[in-house]
Image (tube, helix red, strand yellow):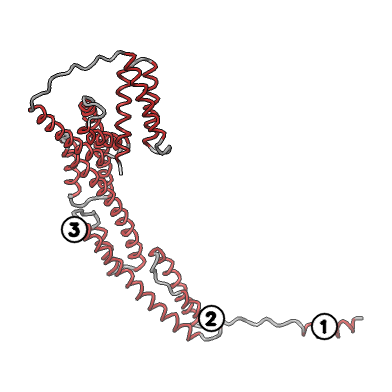
């Protein structure tokens, strides 16, 4: 048995492969590894540039494949070429985007606003000239972010100021006193023109502009409502079939509707037109008054029952007209409310109030019929 075992031992040992020592990397392989690692690290740092950031991933893959096939020198050439391209493209991207930043800053200055970024631009310039490209890229991306946010906030503020200017001008045309708001608007513009405007100061000015716009939206409706109430009283002097006042009645309905919907600009324009129509009406009345008056005819006295009957007929006629309106329209909904209100007033024998409500409804329906 012992002889058999000893006779099999050399054969068994001969089947075990001997360990092949791994040769140490050559100087070229170590250099390839160092360059590859540096390129990957640099691309990672430059990734913050976003779209347009230099990328040599394809060269890294090509170099790795060449080295795996034993072409170490060729891999080194590929990596050196990638290194040069990465440096060149990084410089190109940074220079191009820095110039774009400078152009945007100049555009803001021409528009009358000076963003407090002089120190940031100086630091970025130094980093581009002498510092590492990774540091320059980081500074560039941060400055781009700040400038983009500032431009957005500034454009938003310009929109607010434009709304304020428009409403203020229109309000001034109809004689609404806005001295306080004009002063606040002037103060905002003076602060906007100050040098070294920061994000914080721009935000404060935007809040001030928003408050000023809110004051306008509070002041204008109150004044217009008061004036429209006076004009309604003046128009109530005319009978419903008074042709010369029909255009003024329609304009009064239109102005009231714009005001209820919060369309202040349209409401101001309608009130201005309403004033013109009323002035024409007054001139026509003055001309009529200059003529010799006809012989007075005493109007017949109307009893309460007669008035009630007349108003009921008027309410039925108007209700029939309301039913012809598109059911989903604003006019139909408003008219339905006024019909119910007039009906309740008639039941309570408040005939004068019912007559006024029906008269307003007739104006609304007349205006709606006259619209194209």
Please report the residue visible at 45 percent of the width from the left and 82 percent of the height from the top: 78
Image quadrant where residue 323 sits: top left
For discs 2 and 1, the disc positioned in front in the rendered view:
2
Q: Distance from label 3 to label 2 (Cα)?
A: 55 Å
Residue 246's x, y, as percent? 24, 34
Q: Distance from label 3 to label 1 (Cα)?
A: 95 Å
If you read the primary sequence from the N terminus, does the residue marked by circle 2 or circle 1 appear first?
1
Residue 370 shows in this picture: yes
368 over 360 or under it: above or below: below
Residue 148's x, y, as percent? 31, 56
Q: Which residue is mark 1?
A: 9
Judging depth in this view, the residue of 279 and 111 nearest the camera is 279
Left or right of 359, for residue 72: right
Please report the residue visible at 60 percent of the width from the left and 81 percent of the height from the top: 22
Judging depth in this view, the residue of 2 and 102 nearest the camera is 102
Residue 110 is marked as 3
The N terminus, quarter of image: bottom right
Left or right of 292, for residue 3: right
127 over 82 or under it: above or below: above
Q: Residues within 10 Å of mark 1 (few under 14, many from 20)?
A: few
């Amino acid at each position: 048995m012992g002889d058999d075992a000893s006779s099999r031992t050399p054969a068994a040992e001969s089947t075990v492969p001997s360990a092949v020592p791994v040769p140490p990397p050559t100087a070229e392989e170590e250099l390839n590894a160092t360059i590859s690692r540096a390129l990957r690290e640099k691309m990672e740092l430059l990734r913050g540039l976003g779209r347009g950031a230099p990328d040599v991933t394809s060269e890294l893959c090509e170099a790795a494949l060449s080295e795996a096939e034993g072409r170490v020198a060729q891999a080194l050439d590929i990596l050196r070429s990638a290194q040069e391209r990465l440096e060149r493209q990084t410089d190109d991207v940074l220079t191009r985007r820095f110039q774009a930043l400078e152009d945007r800053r100049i555009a803001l200055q021409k528009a009358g606003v000076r963003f407090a970024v002089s120190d940031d631009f100086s630091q970025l310039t130094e980093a581009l000239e002498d510092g590492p490209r990774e540091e320059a890229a980081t500074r560039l991306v941060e400055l781009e972010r700040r400038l983009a946010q500032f431009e957005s906030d500034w454009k938003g503020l310009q929109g607010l100021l434009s709304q304020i200017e428009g409403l203020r001008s229109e309000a001034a045309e109809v004689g609404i006193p806005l001295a306080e708001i004009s002063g606040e608007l002037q103060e905002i513009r003076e602060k906007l023109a100050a040098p070294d405007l920061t994000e914080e100061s721009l935000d404060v000015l935007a809040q001030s502009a928003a408050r000023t716009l809110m004051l306008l939206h509070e002041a204008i409706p109150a004044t217009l409502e008061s004036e429209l109430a006076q004009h309604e009283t003046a128009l109530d002097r005319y009978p419903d079939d008074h042709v010369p006042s029909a255009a003024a009645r329609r304009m009064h309905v239109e102005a009231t509707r714009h005001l209820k919907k919060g369309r202040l600009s349209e409401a101001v324009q309608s009130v201005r037109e309403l004033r013109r129509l009323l002035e024409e009406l007054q001139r026509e009345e003055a001309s009529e008054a200059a003529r010799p008056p006809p012989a007075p005819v005493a109007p017949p006295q109307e009893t309460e029952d007669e008035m009630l009957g007349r108003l009921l007929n008027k309410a039925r006629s108007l209700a029939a007209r309301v039913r012809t309106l598109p059911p989903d329209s604003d006019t139909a909904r408003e008219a339905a409310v006024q019909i119910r209100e007039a009906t309740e007033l008639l039941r309570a024998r408040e005939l004068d109030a019912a007559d006024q409500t029906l008269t307003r409804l007739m104006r609304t329906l007349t205006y709606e019929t006259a619209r194209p």
